[in-house]
Image: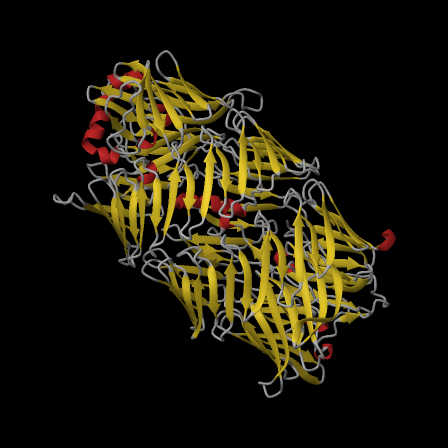
């Protein structure tokens, strides 16, 4: 889980990386509400100190008296287009500079307290701004908002540097500004009201004099409010929120010196939030709870010429005599940039700003007389063009390839239509409050919304006509959500609008406790288990205490970077940073260290693993990733079209995959080293048809709401039905196997009927599955307070217990013991990284060793278990496994296994040979006896068939066809001359866990004609790997025994079989590997092929995506349907997965024999339940969740 809003999120792209690194710290809890004392565009903290030569004499009235009122009028007279631009309308480069004006702009949020109407204190520096007061003349702020009145009208001095000029309004006759956002100004008795129709916020200003009105209150349509209180001298003293927050403001000599949250300290007193210091009236220090200052150096005009953050990182700026930034650079040359400003064309009023980065690459911006960027030319010459109206609303955008998207607005400024490059249009209609009540999609489908008189959303009707309704109390706080079936979730909120209790439609209640900041301090789930959270003053999670009393903690530096994480067993991970809070190193609890380097444009350039191997990244002049060279010195290159979309990638063997796109950017053709696949899309812009290079055709049909109702591969169709909520209720496979699902009012599956057999599911209040019942069989589960599975029981007829397991965990959640009714006790030894180093059981021991990066270096397991040849030491070349015991491996230039050879005493070695296509898909294997298998795939890359060929290499002697439900295998059909009939296996899943397997024999010439069938319930382990099959009488007809890493065998007296292994994994006996949608896994070394990527670029230009099954703490990994591990998006651009050999490998796959394949050709994979190892099962899957 992530920390919501952990980093300030305004327009500073370089600093958004803060959010990514926190994913590496295993920050675990969502929360709403926090203090954010960090600069969005730079750094932030503060200490008051002397020298107030430019201090204002007597509060806000003093501001007017010293002539700033005249300056405000001059600001709009001299540059109304510039002054009326909101922050979001400014296009900024580097740290950050507004390219239209050249002004250096540093926005900051000092305080953000959550609620329906958040209490936010913000500041913004701008190098040309001189209208500030409480934080110095160059800072606009929440506290400096005011109206200045003169004979020409009224001038709003807003936060974020906004300055708007109004004609004088008459009472009840509001006026609009000459430029900028359409906020209306009205005259009231003793003041003014300023209304932002889009947000529903109203600002109330009270007259302080004939020439000045100060902000007195901000409220919304629901009656929530924030009052601004001043002392007798006009200095701000308090901000008071209707939700209970009270912010105290300290001032001295006309400057704000500190902010405090009333009654928020541990002792009940006021909590110091942030302090400010000044030199000659200019803000020069900001201090947060770390006690270390962020320091600014200002010139005589108050312009910031440098800052030094709490980690001593330094950044400097230079300006010309028009307050434009001409140069900036960090101490190490990071973000070193120059800005050049062309002369204004007297005819058009346009000028050009040229930005040159630290590598000498230039970007050109063409700016019109309204301070709007109308063209941007990147360093490669690609031009993007924009058109805007006088209110800075985007009218059109044309990409470098000439594709134009255009926009239309109504008289109130609401966007009413967007026309795409293909000419199709999306439309919207609005109510009197400017809220969208009708949304028409390009495909013609309509979504309707209703709002109450206060602007609260009361209903949403989707294109299928199903309506979800929302209820609110008198303060606009959400009280209920009712789905189209009438099932209601109830919410009780505090005064600020933050949830205190959530009651689901079944009555299960989740409770929240909050501190004075609005942050969650305790969460009690419906079972009564409570998790407690502690926070720093700045809102970073510092401790989490689980319901069982175990806890983990985090520490942070003054910039909010997590510097350490201590897990529940005392293991410490350390994190180091450099300029702009970029990570430089991570050291795990076991001392393993990864190092990260970034170039001067703050892009990841190198990762060094503990062995000293490096992964390097290269970028083009436009900053897009063009090459990455992995730890084995294999290079993958990327090319882009003129619009910056990925056009091709070329691997280390020179194989290119090229993409052709339509005007919407959708891929319409893919050429993989000469093998072409085409794609076509329906009216909803979703894939409708694709044809592979071998003629494999994929056809997808959808209903009018865009839901898939049929997916056919070469005519073999999988069909679906849905209920009113869009949940799947029926699925029919190509063999006519039908599954039907039903749900309770909380949306959980309560029953499943597959192949005529029904299974009922029972859940506890927290939604965990307590049991499932099918016929006379019951599968029961129990959980501890942390939600971990603690026991699993299988009960047959008359309640007879046929199997029972109990699980024991270490404090950090790693599995350390299993007690199995049939296999006895197992105990697991773990190293500091949480990897299993030994498995101990009766007459059974496994041992494993790992190197610094997590590669397995040696392994042993008992004699008699399959895979004896793989016992022993492992050797590697780079990261590629070359030998495991007596098994030798060879790889191609991409690290994919092309040969696996097993040494045999006095006999010819057994050799498997593998071939791959340009998309890393296995295309064929030749087994030791010379048998050749071939594999085919659909246009989405899913395996459609495996084919066993005769000695001539052409004649088909066995065929297995596969059907996929998304990326989950749901059916296979085996056809062979050796079999009198087709054999079909169909699987049903609950999430990623297989629940049932139906085995049917059908006539080859009439697949719907069933000759015989058997039904099995599947019992799975902690992560969803099948451990037993149960027949309809409740008897165990198949039971596995496996090594830690998945080398599997089963009882000789088994009368059934399943090829399923870890979630998404399928065992191919002919290859000896487990297959999933992405790659193959060998459980004995263990290893994957093709190699699991440590990073993989996204389709979006220049983005990196980390995706690896080798994931360790503190990252929180999620098991994917394809059997791998997916890193959460929050840190996909920050660094790489830490090591191999972690839980991901243990979640990956297991090996056994396939249906319809002769076991004599492959390893012995059965065991005698009557031998001395009968009661030993060596399966261990430490749970890192």
Question: Which of 292 and 217 lies nearest the eye of the viewer?
Answer: 217
Q: Is residue 154 above or below residue 657?
A: above
Question: Which of 309 and 810 lies nearest the eye of the viewer?
Answer: 810
Residue lying farthest to the left in this orientation = 346
Image position of 977 (left or right of 1128): right
- The number of callouts visible is 0
Q: Residue at x 34, y 25 (%)?
A: 194
Q: Colour scheme used in the picture? A: secondary structure
The image position of residue 52, as x and y in percent, is 31, 21
Task: Tell me, yes or no, if residue 1061 can be seen here.
Answer: no
Q: Is residue 739 above or below residue 284?
A: below
Q: Residue at x 61, y 49 (%)?
A: 589
Where on the picture, by quarter, is residue 1039?
A: bottom right
Where on the picture, by quarter, is residue 622?
A: bottom left
Q: Quadrant of the N terminus?
A: top right
Question: Which of 1001 and 1017 lies nearest the eye of the viewer?
Answer: 1001
The image position of residue 676, as x and y in percent, is 44, 72
Residue lying farthest to the top in this orientation = 232
Where on the picture, by quarter, is residue 678?
A: bottom left
The image position of residue 3, as x and y in percent, is 53, 40
Q: Residue at x 51, y 48 (%)?
A: 464
The image position of residue 654, as x and y in percent, is 42, 73
Question: Which of 998 and 901 lies nearest the eye of the viewer?
Answer: 998
Task: Tell me, yes or no, if residue 336 can be seen here.
Answer: yes
Image position of 1027 (left or right of 566): right
């Amino acid at each position: 889980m992530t920390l919501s809003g952990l980093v300030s999120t305004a327009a500073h792209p370089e600093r958004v990386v803060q959010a990514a690194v926190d994913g590496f710290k295993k920050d675990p809890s969502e929360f709403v509400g926090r203090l954010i004392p960090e600069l969005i565009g730079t750094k932030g903290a503060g200490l008051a100190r002397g020298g107030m030569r430019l201090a204002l004499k007597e509060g806000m009235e003093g501001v007017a008296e010293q002539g700033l009122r005249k300056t405000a009028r001059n600001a709009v007279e001299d540059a109304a287009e510039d002054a009326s631009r909101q922050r979001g309308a400014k296009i900024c480069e580097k740290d950050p500079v507004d390219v239209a004006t050249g002004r250096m702009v540093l926005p900051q949020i000092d305080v953000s307290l959550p609620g329906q109407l958040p209490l936010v204190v913000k500041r913004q520096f701008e190098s040309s701004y001189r209208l500030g007061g409480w934080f110095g003349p160059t800072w606009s702020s929440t506290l400096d908002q005011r109206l200045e009145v003169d004979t020409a009208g009224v001038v709003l001095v807003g936060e974020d540097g906004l300055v708007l000029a109004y004609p004088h309004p008459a009472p009840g006759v509001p006026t609009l500004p000459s430029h900028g956002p359409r906020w209306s100004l009205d005259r009231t008795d003793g003041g003014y009201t300023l209304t932002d129709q889009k947000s529903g916020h109203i600002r109330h200003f009270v007259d302080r004099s004939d020439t000045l009105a100060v902000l007195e209150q901000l409220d919304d349509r629901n009656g929530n409010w924030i009052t601004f209180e001043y002392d007798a001298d006009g200095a701000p003293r308090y901000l008071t929120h209707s939700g209970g927050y009270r912010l105290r403001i300290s001032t001295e000599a006309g400057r704000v010196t500190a902010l405090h949250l009333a009654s928020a300290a541990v002792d009940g007193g006021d909590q110091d939030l942030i302090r400010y210091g000044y030199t000659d009236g200019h803000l020069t220090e900001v201090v947060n709870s770390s006690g270390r200052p962020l320091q600014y150096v200002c010139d005589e005009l108050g312009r910031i010429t440098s800052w030094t953050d709490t980690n001593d990182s330094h950044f400097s700026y230079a300006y010309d005599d028009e307050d434009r930034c001409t140069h900036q650079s960090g101490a190490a040359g990071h973000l070193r940039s120059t800005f050049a400003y062309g002369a204004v064309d007297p005819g058009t009023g346009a000028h050009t700003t040229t930005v040159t980065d630290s590598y000498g690459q230039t970007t050109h911006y063409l700016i019109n007389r309204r301070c709007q960027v109308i063209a941007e030319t990147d360093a490669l010459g690609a031009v993007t063009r924009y058109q805007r109206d006088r209110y800075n609303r985007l009218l059109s955008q044309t990409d470098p390839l000439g594709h134009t998207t255009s926009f239309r607005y109504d008289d109130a400024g609401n966007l009413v239509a967007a026309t795409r490059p293909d000419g199709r249009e999306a439309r919207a209609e609005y109510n009197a409050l400017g809220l969208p009540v009708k949304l028409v999609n390009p495909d013609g489908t309509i979504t309707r919304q209703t709002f109450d008189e206060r602007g609260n959303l009361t209903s949403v009707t989707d294109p299928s006509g199903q309506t979800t309704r929302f209820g609110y109390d008198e303060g606009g706080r959400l009280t209920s959500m009712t789905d189209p079936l009438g099932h209601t979730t109830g919410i009780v909120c505090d005064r600020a609008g933050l949830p205190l209790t959530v009651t689901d439609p079944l009555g299960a209640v989740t409770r929240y406790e909050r501190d004075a900041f609005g942050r969650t301090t305790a969460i009690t789930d419906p079972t009564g288990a409570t998790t407690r959270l502690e926070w720093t003053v700045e809102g970073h999670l510092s401790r989490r205490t689980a319901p069982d009393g175990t806890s983990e903690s985090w520490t942070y530096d003054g910039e909010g970077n997590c510097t350490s994480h201590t897990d529940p067993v005392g293991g410490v991970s350390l994190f180091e940073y450099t300029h702009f809070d970029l990570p430089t190193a991570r050291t795990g609890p076991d001392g393993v260290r990864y190092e990260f380097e970034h170039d001067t444009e703050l892009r990841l350039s190198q990762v060094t693993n503990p062995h000293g191997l490096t992964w390097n990244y290269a970028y083009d002049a436009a900053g897009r990733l063009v090459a990455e060279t992995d730890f084995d010195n294999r290079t993958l290159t990327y090319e882009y079209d003129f619009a910056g979309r990925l056009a091709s990638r070329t691997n280390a063997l020179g194989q290119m995959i090229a993409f052709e796109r339509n005007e919407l950017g959708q891929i319409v053709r893919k050429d993989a080293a000469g093998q072409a696949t085409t794609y076509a899309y329906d009216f909803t812009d979703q894939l409708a048809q694709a044809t592979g290079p071998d003629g494999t055709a994929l056809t997808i049909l959808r209903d009018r709401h865009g839901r898939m109702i049929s997916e056919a591969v070469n005519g073999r169709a999988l069909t679906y039905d849905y209920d009113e909520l869009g949940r799947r209720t029926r699925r029919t496979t190509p063999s006519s196997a039908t599954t039907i699902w039903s749900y309770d009012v909380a949306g959980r599956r309560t029953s499943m009927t597959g192949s005529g057999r029904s299974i009922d599911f029972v859940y506890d209040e927290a939604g965990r599955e307590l049991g499932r019942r099918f016929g006379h069989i019951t599968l029961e589960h129990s959980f501890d307070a942390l939600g971990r599975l603690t026991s699993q029981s299988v009960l047959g007829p008359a309640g007879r217990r046929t199997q029972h397991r109990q699980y024991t965990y270490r404090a950090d959640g790693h599995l350390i013991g299993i007690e199995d009714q049939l296999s006895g006790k197992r105990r697991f030894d773990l190293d500091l990284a949480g990897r299993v180093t030994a498995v101990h059981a009766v007459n059974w021991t496994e041992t494993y060793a790992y190197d610094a990066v997590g590669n397995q270096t040696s392994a042993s397991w008992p004699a008699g278990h399959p895979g004896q040849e793989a016992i022993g030491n492992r050797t590697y070349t780079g990261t590629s496994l070359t030998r495991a015991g007596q098994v030798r491996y060879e790889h191609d230039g991409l690290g994919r296994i092309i040969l696996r050879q097993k040494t045999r005493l006095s006999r010819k070695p057994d050799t498997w040979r593998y071939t791959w296509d340009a998309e890393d898909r296995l295309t064929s294997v030749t087994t030791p006896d010379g048998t050749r298998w071939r594999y085919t795939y659909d246009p989405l890359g899913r395996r459609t068939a495996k084919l066993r060929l005769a000695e001539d290499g052409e004649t088909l002697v066995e065929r297995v066809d596969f059907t996929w439900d998304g990326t989950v295998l749901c059916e296979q059909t085996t056809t062979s001359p050796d079999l009198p009939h087709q054999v079909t296996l169909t699987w049903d899943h609950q999430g990623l866990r297989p629940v049932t397997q139906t085995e049917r024999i059908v006539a080859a010439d009439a697949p719907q004609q069933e000759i015989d069938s058997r039904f099995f319930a599947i019992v799975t382990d902690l992560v969803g790997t099948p451990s037993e099959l149960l027949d309809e009488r409740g008897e165990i007809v198949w039971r596995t025994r496996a090594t830690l890493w998945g080398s599997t065998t089963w009882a000789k007296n088994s009368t059934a079989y399943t090829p399923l292994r870890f979630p998404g994994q399928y065992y191919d006996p002919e290859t000896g590997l487990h297959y999933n949608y992405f790659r193959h896994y060998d459980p004995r070394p263990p290893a994957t092929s093709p190699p699991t990527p440590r990073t993989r670029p996204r389709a979006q230009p220049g983005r990196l995506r980390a995706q690896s099954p080798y994931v360790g703490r503190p990252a929180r990994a999620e098991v994917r349907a394809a059997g791998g591990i997916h890193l959460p998006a929050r840190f996909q651009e920050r660094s790489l997965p830490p090591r191999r050999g972690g839980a991901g490998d243990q979640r990956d796959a297991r090996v056994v024999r396939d249906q319809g394949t002769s076991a004599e050709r492959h390893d012995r994979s059965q065991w005698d339940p009557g031998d001395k190892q009968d009661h030993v099962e060596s399966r261990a899957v430490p749970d890192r969740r």
